[in-house]
Image: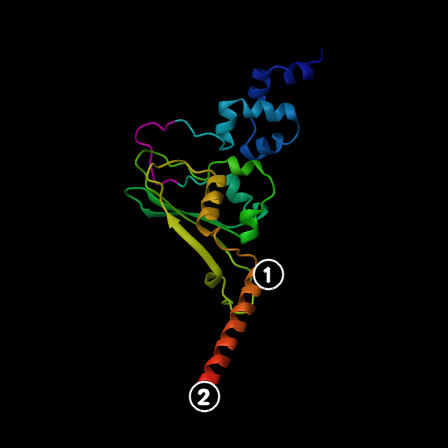
Amino acid sequence: MSAANTVLTTPELLETILLHLPPSQLLSAHLISRTFSAAINSSPPLRRSLWLAPRRPDPPGTPVTNYNLNHLLADHARALDIDTLLQWNRDKQSGRVIIDVYWRSWAHVVDPAPRSSDWMLVFQPRGKGVEVSWSVGFYEARRPGLPVCREGRKREWTFRWEDGRLATLGMLRAAVVERFGVVDWSPAHKEAAGVEEEEEEEGGAAEEGTAMGL
């Protein structure tokens, strides 16, 4: 057996080599082969490096106001159809933060391409007792009747999990669907609904005019 085959068939050796890769390259290695993918998925240190598992507790005294947003998601936000992915530190003393996650459209929320990124943690606070609020949503597509400015087309929801759970991107996507999923936000549906509303208004006006004439 060659040295390369020995490494590939020995999980401990392969893990040791992969641990030397920066997270961005480790993410690429995850897609190279099933062998690499299996090695990463079965290794707690490699999973922590890719934000697929929580990091180990930080030593006492570690500042809680450091930015702890998943840089892998932030660096590839556009490729993941995410318009905004930001961390806001509201209180430097307590470390309370708001995390903004806004998808480019409703379709990108409900019909995404299958990606391992949905299993990645979005944020990991350093220290205990950090209060995290999530501001999530999407942008409606431009159409007649909607504001031209992007902020006017934003659909947003701010909430906080009382149990302080660490949220993955998939969990936040599910939260947006649960909050806004009672309405079909697709442009075609909204345009059809607008036409129906106009017809109802015209019909009501005609009936009112007839009654007044009597």
> Where does the C terminus fall, quadrant-wise?
bottom left
Vertical arrangement, residue 203 with respect to residue 69, above or below: below
Callout 2: SS = loop
The type of residue carrying mark 2 is: Leu
Dots 1, 2 in contact, CB < 8 A: no
> Which residue lies most toward the left here?
93
Q: Is residue 51 magenta?
A: no
Q: Can you tell which mark lies on residue 40?
A: none
Residue drawn 65% across the image and 25% down it: 34
Q: Position of residue 183 (x, y in %)?
A: 49, 55
Vertical arrangement, residue 64 with respect to residue 105, above or below: above
Q: Position of residue 159 (x, y in %)?
A: 37, 47
Q: Which residues are magenta?
A: 57-66
Q: Quadrant of residue 117?
A: top right
Marks 1 and 2, the one that precedes in the sequence:
1
> Where does the N terminus fall, quadrant-wise?
top right
The type of residue carrying mark 1 is: Ala
Residue drawn 41% across the image and 52% down it: 157
Q: Is residue 3 left or right of residue 152?
A: right
Q: Is residue 114 left or right of residue 47?
A: right
Q: Label 2 belongs to which residue?
A: 214
> Which residue lies most toward the top here?
1
Q: Label 1 belongs to which residue?
A: 188
Q: Quadrant of residue 166?
A: top left
Residue in front for this viewpoint, 214 or 109: 214
Callout 1: SS = helix
* Helix, strand or loop for the magenta stretch, by majority: loop
How far is disc 1 from disc 2 in space, using C-alphas? 40 Å
Q: Residues within 10 Å of mark 2 (few under 14, many from 20)?
A: few
Residue drawn 52% across the image and 41% down it: 73
The residue mark sitting in front, 1 or 2, is 2
